[in-house]
Image (cartoon, rainbow, N blue to C red):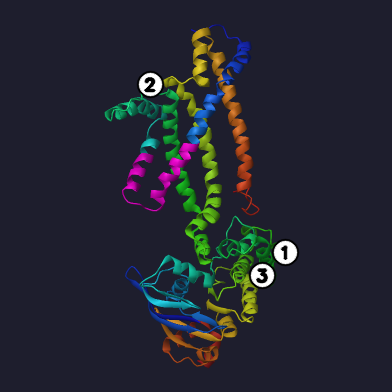
Amino acid sequence: MISISNLHKKFGKNEVLKGINIQVDKGDVISILGPSGSGKTTLLRCLNYLERPDEGIITIDNVTIDSKKVHKKDIYHLRKKSAMVFQSYNLFQHKTVLQNVMEGLVVVQKVNVKEAREIALEMLKKVGLEQKVDAYPLQLSGGQQQRVGIARALALNPEVILFDEPTSALDPELVGEVLDVIRKISREGITMIIVTHEMNFAREVSNRVIFMDGGVVVEEGVPNDIFRTPKEDRTKQFLKRMTPELEYSI
Amino acid sequence: MGKVFDPSLIIEFIPTLVKYLGVTLEILVASIILGTIIGIAAAIPKLFHIPILKQIVTLYISFIRGTPIIIQLFLVFYGLPAVLSLINIDITRMDALIFVIITYSLSNGAIFAEIFRGAISAVEFGQTEAAYSIGMTPFQNFTRIIFPQAIRVAFPNIANTVIGSLKDTSLAFTIGVMDMMGRGETIIAATAHALEVYIALSVIYYVVVLILEKGFKVFEKYTNRYQGTDASVA
C-alpha cells in the first residue's frame, strides 16, 4: 500500500537519506528506530512532502510521486493520503481544540460543518478530550495537546498516520497518556509509521520494526527478532545503549 | 505677543476647530488604508526574499525611518511635481491634501511593511507544516492559519502607528491644508490668542486618541483570547 523506493535526500553536502526502500502493508504499525541523525524524521517528512526528496519514488495508495518530476497537484494528492503527528504538536493556536480537529475536514475535504463537528467530537472522545473541546491549545498540557494532534490526524481518516517522535517533547509523566492513545488506535487497523525513541513501546505496539542508521535501513523485522536477536552490529549497539535491561538477550 | 489669557475662549474655539476634525480623520483613514496596501506589497519581497525588489524595499523603508516626516512632506510636495513635469504632467494645481495623503501613505507603508513582516515571521513555522500536512494550499494556510495569528502580534504596533499618524497629520497645515491645525493657525492669526487655540487643539487630539485607544484595547483583548490564562501578564 505504501512503497518507498530508492529515496535520497541531501541537506547541502550532508546526505541524510542514502537510498531507502520500504514496503508497508495496510494495517501495518511500523516503528522506525535509530540514533539521532540517522534520517528517520527526514524519511517521515519526505512521505508527507514536507521535505522534497532529491531522488526516489513514493507511492501511497493510488498516488505515486517520482521526485524527478513532481507536480504541485501530486503533492496535494499525496498529502491527503497521510496525516502527520508532530513532535512539537503544531496545533493551530488561534483555534479551539474542536476547530483544530475540524479544520482539515472543512477546508480540505469540504465536509459540511455539522458533519465535521460530529467527526471531530468522536475523535476527541477517542483521545479522551471530550471535556476540552472549547479550550485553546495553550490552555492544555503537552500531553493533551499531542492528543489533539492525534485526533486532528485521525479525523482526516488518512491511509496512514505518520508519527514524528510524538512523545519526545513531553514531560516524562505525560508520555504515558499519549502512548496509551496511540496504543489504542493501533488496534483499530489504522496503518501507522512511528518514529520513536520509546523502545518498549515500539516493541509492544508495532508489528514491524525498522532500524535506521547513517541514512540507510540497517535491519528490519518483527519486533521480537529485532529486539531479541538483532543480526547487525549497529542494531545491537544501539539497542544496548537504549535498553540496558535487555542486555541479557542480545 | 499674545493677548491676555482667556480660558473661556478655549471652550469657544473647540466647536470651530472640531468642524475640521473631518479633514484630519480623512488624512488618517486614507493614509492608513493606502499604507496598509503599500505595507503588504513592501513586505512580500522581504518575506519571500525576492532579489532586487527586496533591496529596493529595504532602501525605501530605511529612508522613511531615517528622515523626519515634515521633510518627507516637503520632498513630496515640491519633488513630485518636479519629477512629473519631466514627463509633461502638471500637478502644481493639485489639492495639497493629496500630497499629504501620498506622504503619509508612504510613511505608514514603510512602517507597516516592517510590522507585517515581523508578525508573519513570528507565527511558528510548525503550524504552516501542520497546515500543509493536512493538505492545505499555501493560500489557505496564509488566510486561515498565519494571518489571524499575525494580526495578534502586529496589532499593538499597528495601533501605535495609527495614533502616531493621527498626531503627525498636524503637520499638514505646513503645505497649506486646512485641517484642524490649519484652522487653528488662522484663528491665531485673526485673534492672537495662541495659547487658547493650542489648548483647545490638544484637548481635541487627546480625546480622539483616548477614544482610539479604548477601541484598540477591546480589539486587542479579542486577538489575545487564545493566549492561555496568563495573557494579561504577557
* Amino acid type assigned to the residue bearing label 3 in the image: Met
Q: Which contiguous range is marked in magenta?
A: B33-61
* Amino acid type assigned to the residue bearing label 2 in the image: Arg
Q: Nearer the viewer, residue B20 or B221?
A: B20
State the image coordinates of residue A62 (x, y, percent, origin top left).
49, 77
Judge the density around disc 3: few (<14), some (14-19), many (≥20) Cα neighbours within 10 Å. many
Report the disc number at residue A123: 3
Same chain under badges 1 and 2? The reply is: no
Q: Is the residue under label 2 in contact with that under label 1 (CB below 8 Å)? A: no
State the image coordinates of residue A7 (x, y, percent, origin top left).
39, 77
Which residue is denoted by mark 2 in the rendering? B93
Task: Work out whether B60 lies above or below A153.
Answer: above
Judge the density around disc 2: few (<14), some (14-19), many (≥20) Cα neighbours within 10 Å. few
Q: Which of marks 3 and 2 is in front?
A: 2
In the image, taking residue A157 as reference, residue A34 lies left or right, namely left
Distance from the alpha carbon under mark 1 to that under mark 3: 12 Å
Report the disc number at residue A131: 1
Q: Which of A119 and A63 is in front in this view?
A: A63
* Amino acid type assigned to the residue bearing label 1 in the image: Gln
Q: Is residue B177 magenta?
A: no
Distance from the alpha carbon under mark 3 to that under mark 2: 67 Å
Tag 2, which chain?
B
